[in-house]
Amino acid sequence: MKKLKIDLGELAVAFETDMSMVGEGGSYLDTQTGEVVMLSGELSFSLDDFGEDEGAGSENEVAAFETWLDTCNLPDWQKEQARTLYEIDRDENKRYVAVPLIDSHEGYQQMVEFTQTVNDEHLLELLRVALNGRGAFRRFKDVLADHSPEERARWFAFKDERVKEEMLDWLRTLDIEPLE
């Protein structure tokens, strides 16, 4: 198993944050350095814009890409993200692995499991009602915020532990042991 220094806090954020809401974006783990790369979905370009007429596929593709990037009217942070996205897009050695996003079904299941650990009958009933129908995530959090700071803190610790378990399971599938 490959030992790799990884910031598990950053990886947890990547597991829980959908960076691809608009345009290209996403979160990746660099399996050589352990860096968590988060690319904003708010990029105002697409690598598809760098086409055959720009030099894609040529021997000097990297130089052509840099030339193309220089002609783009992008802020420096987006140019940096474009370079990273370009590198990830051209990655044939599987250096970068997309970080899976915890989907809403898993998040809902975590709330159900937490609810089963609540001893306060009144809070238990409020959480069961909150979990029914659309808007369950918001209602669940509102009930905890309104009812008990201690139970709210316990919920976040419970959720963090579940996310950590998911991350460690995922890293094992990549044959990576994280070093913090």
Image: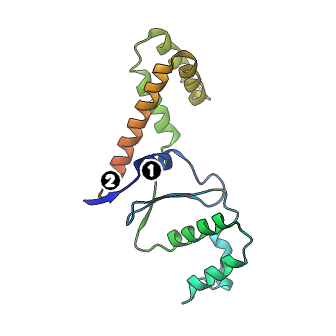
Residue at numbered disc 1: 11
Q: Residue furthest left?
A: 1
Q: Is residue 33 left or right of residue 80?
A: left
Residue in the image at 44% along x and 74% along y: 92
164 left or right of 139 in image: left
Q: Is residue 126 above or below residue 92?
A: above
Total numbered badges shown on the rendered structure: 2
Secondary structure of residue under mark 1: helix
Residue count near mark 2 (Cα–Cα under 10 Å), binned few <14, some 14–19, many ≥20? some
Which percent across, then down, holds residue 58? Answer: 57, 88
Against 169, residue 123 (above or below) is above
Question: Element type at marker 2?
Answer: strand
When the figure is inspected, residue 62 is found, relative to residue 84, above or below; the finding is: below
Say which label, 1 or 2, has the lower sequence index.
Answer: 1
Decide which of 28, 124 is in the foreground and name it: 28
Q: Position of residue 126 (x, y in %)?
A: 53, 15
Real-space Cα separation, disc 1 to disc 2, in angstroms? 11 Å
Q: Where residue 178 is drawn, which disc sits there?
A: 2
* Viewer can see residue 57: no
Residue occupying the point 56% across, 49% down: 18
**Snapshot quadrant of residue 49:** bottom right
Is 161 situated above or below 94?
A: above
The residue under label 2 is which amino acid type? Pro
Position of the N terminus by quadrant: bottom left
Work out whether residue 158 or residue 138 is closer to the camera in this orientation and state it: 158
Residue 113 picture location, percent across and down = 41, 27
Residue at (46% x, 31% y) in the render: 156
